[in-house]
Image (cartoon, rainbow, N blue to C red):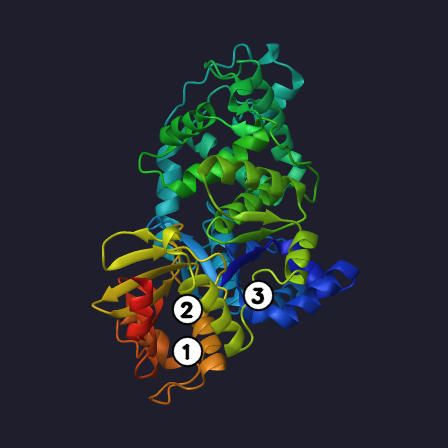
Amino acid sequence: MARVYFDTNVFSNLKSNVNSKFQGLNEKLNLYKESFSFVFSPAHIRDKQNDSTEKKFEDFDFIETIVGDNHISYSILTHETSFYPATPRMVFDDLAKEKNFLENFWDLTSENEDVNQLKASILEKTSQQIVPIDLSKFHEQSEEQKNFMSMIIPTEKDVITLKDIMLKTTEYIRQMLSNSGNVYKQTRDIIGEGLKLHAFINEHIDVNKFLENGSLTSDFWEYIKTKVGEQKVDYSDYDLYLFAYSALDFFGINKDGISKKNGYRNIFNDSLHSYYAKFCDYLITDDKGLSQKSKALFESLGIQTKVLSVQDFIDLLHEGGEVAEKTLTEFLNKFSRNIINVDAKSKKKLSNEYLIISPKERLLNFFDDAAEIRNGKDVYFLLKRKNMHSLSKLNYGEIEIVINKCIQLLGKDKFSYGRFDRESEIDEIRNGKWRNRLWGDDPYILLRYPHNGEFCLIFGPFNNVYAENYQ
């Protein structure tokens, strides 16, 4: 099925259900919810971290009614993005610990005395280390530059230590994350203008070369790789993408408006939304900045994710697009016109026994790739999903939807296995011992996982008549 990523504002408007547009979307979701896989990420939870009320938990519970535990996240330990079952409340609990740690980084009142001693030792040692910073020309700078430098350097001091820099930097980051004092806007204006004038940093950067005919150029990506490489030796695609998104804002390309409600935290969270959405089929947002930046990055990187407004997504549903078959007859008709009755010339021949078929329609709103496998005069058809990116394979929530859709159309299999049992079958999949689903004998339909690591549906063997006609 198509994988859909709503931004946080879409969830909020669906929950309030006041606007007629979102009332219409709620109605469509009630009809077609099981035709799609809706996912959420840590970005949705981060968007609510400044909310000190209990309302955010009501929001999390509402989001869960749509996404379940279909959670996608990046691990800084393994440098991998993956799906794992977790509800919005569970993710909030984890991020709350992280937020508290950042906000109280140098606080010496931790319950862990070893941590307090380590921090105290670091502060003591760094207080003895002098950092040679030449501020002799500080008074010659513009007021904007002075204000910016004072945010990251204790310019009022004659002698500056490493401890001073560490404490100042920590406070600067804290203010950036809390949108305090419009720190991000000041930073963006100073750095962005400095880059455009080839000042502020000793480099020759022509921002105008970053865009050509509305598309990001190789010059842009070379700059991004250079800058990220200076900060991290073992950087990942995640690091590159988030830096690239922020760079678009710094350079004034699709620049976001800055206010007390929309500061660095919001823009960073939007970069996370954009990153996680690239593992989905659709990003649904009415946020102009998120939409434009995501489209620019997706196009430049060859990412297939479609960015749609809420109304565009409603129109897609209204036209019947991306909706799974409701009856067995619908499925068999679609299977026939997309798989069986396909002109031989349109099939890609890998060998005499294996031919690739590209269905024009997605079957069960999931299978968009197929193969015809011949064994003598017997013919089998294998349906699977195209491998578009590292997370193309089904997550547990999506496996559940496909299995339950097959049960809805075909009934229980020949061994009386029915709908997906999350409690037992997730463990079976993890351990490589999933029970499969099998209908019929000759021909049969087999829903199998894994097949070369891919969830697939196999039909066959078809009788000799088909094979003879094919020849």
Local packing at callout 3 (Cα closer than 10 Å; few below 14, some 14-19, many 20+) is many
Q: Where is residue 98 in the image (x, y as percent from the top left)?
A: 47, 54
Q: How far apart are marks 2 and 3 (CA)?
A: 20 Å
Residue visible at 48% across and 26% down? 217
Mark 2 in CB contact with mark 3 (< 8 angstroms): no
Between disc 2 and disc 3, the foreground one is 3
Q: Where is residue 66 in the image (x, y as percent from the top left)?
A: 58, 68
Residue visible at 70% across and 41% down? 260
The image shows residue 222, relative to residue 314, as above or below, that is above
Count of numbered circles in the view: 3
Q: Which of marks 2 and 1 is nearer the N terminus?
A: 2
**Which amino acid, by three-letter code, is at mark 2?**
Tyr
Q: Is residue 404 visible?
A: yes
**Which amino acid, by three-letter code, is at mark 1?**
Arg
Q: Is residue 363 visible?
A: no
Asked if residue 250 lies left or right of residue 302, the reply is right
Mark 3 in CB contact with mark 1 (< 8 angstroms): no
Between disc 3 and disc 1, the foreground one is 3
Residue visible at 41% across and 81% down? 421
Q: How far apart are marks 3 and 1 (CA)?
A: 24 Å
Q: Quadrant of the C terminus?
A: bottom left
Please give the residue where the numbered disc 3 appears in the rendered image.
323
Q: Where is residue 152 in the image (x, y as percent from the top left)?
A: 53, 29
Q: Distance between the residues labelled 2 and 1?
A: 8 Å
The image shows residue 36, relative to residue 7, as above or below, that is below
Q: Position of residue 177 (x, y in %)?
A: 57, 43
Mark 2 in CB contact with mark 1 (< 8 angstroms): yes
Q: Which of marks 2 and 3 is nearer the N terminus?
A: 3
| Res 396 label | 2
Give whichever of 325, 347 is nearer the camera.
Answer: 347
Please give the residue where the numbered disc 1 appears in the rendered image.
422
The image shows residue 435, relative to residue 264, as above or below, that is below
